Amino acid sequence: AQSVTQPDIHITVSEGASLELRCNYSYGATPYLFWYVQSPGQGLQLLLKYFSGDTLVQGIKGFEAEFKRSQSSFNLRKPSVHWSDAAEYFCAVGSMDSSYKLIFGSGTRLLVRP
Amino acid sequence: DVKVTQSSRYLVKRTGEKVFLECVQDMDHENMFWYRQDPGLGLRLIYFSYDVKMKEKGDIPEGYSVSREKKERFSLILESASTNQTSMYLCASTYGLAEEQFFGPGTRLTVL
C-alpha cells in the first residue's frame, strides 16, 4: 500500500540551528514529492516540489530537500532556523499512476527556542 | 495572486444538521479537492472533482457528498452531521496532474 511516514511528531530546535525533517515513502511507481508548511490557523503553503531531474531541490524561505530513491526518502533541510519557521510541516507524495491524488504524511510540528 | 477561499473559518453545528462548506477558486483550475485534517492523521482526502459535475470518492467519503455545478466552486455537504465529523476541513485546487495544490485557509467545524 502507498504510504508516507514522517517519523517525528515534534521537533524542537534553537533559533540559528540547522534543521532536518524526515519523510519516507512507500510507492510502487515513480513518485513526485512535495513539502508543505502550515502556520497556525492557516492553510497549507508549498515550500518545494520534486518531479524529476536534479535530486536536490531548492524552495522558498531558504528550505531545500533531497530526493534519495535508494532510501525512499525526501528529507527537508534548512541551515539556520528562524523563529518564524515554527509551524507544522507536511510531506506529500503522488504519482502519475494515482491520478490527482496526493498522500500526506501525518506532519511534524516544529518548535523554535529563542 | 492565486486564491482559494472557504466560506467560513469557524462553524458550530448540532448533530443531525445538514452542513454546507463552500470553496471557491479564482485560478480556472480543473481539479478541486476536499480534505479533512485531524491531529496525528495528516490530511485525508474526502472527495475530489476533475471537472464540472464530475466527482470521485477519496479515502474517507462516508457521511459526505459534494457538488460542483460551476468550475470555480466546490461544495462539501454533510447530510446529517455527527460529532465524529468535528474537524478541520481544507479545500484545494490544481490545474492538472502532478501540479501543486493550492489550499484555502480551512474551516474548523465543531458538531455538538
Image (spheres, coloured by chain):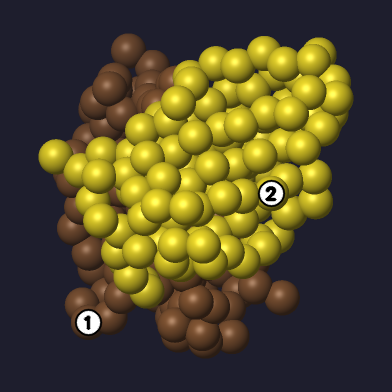
Chain colours: A brown, B yellow
Which residue: 22% across, 82% down? Answer: A53
On screen, residue B87 versus residue A38, left or right, reads right
On screen, residue B109 versus residue A90, left or right, reads right
- Above-or-below relation of B100 to B107: below
Q: Amino acid at mark 2?
A: Ser
Query: Residue under circle 2?
Result: B65
Q: Chain of mark 2?
A: B
Picture quadrant where residue A54 is located: bottom left
**Pick the front one: B109 or A62:** B109
Q: Amino acid at mark 1?
A: Gly
Percent x, y of residue B91: 47, 43
Which residue: 32% across, 12% down? Answer: A114
Which residue: 47% across, 53% down? Answer: B69
The secondary structure type at the circle numbered 2 is strand
Query: Residue under circle 1?
Result: A53
Which residue: 32% across, 44% down? Answer: B25
Percent x, y of residue A77: 32, 50
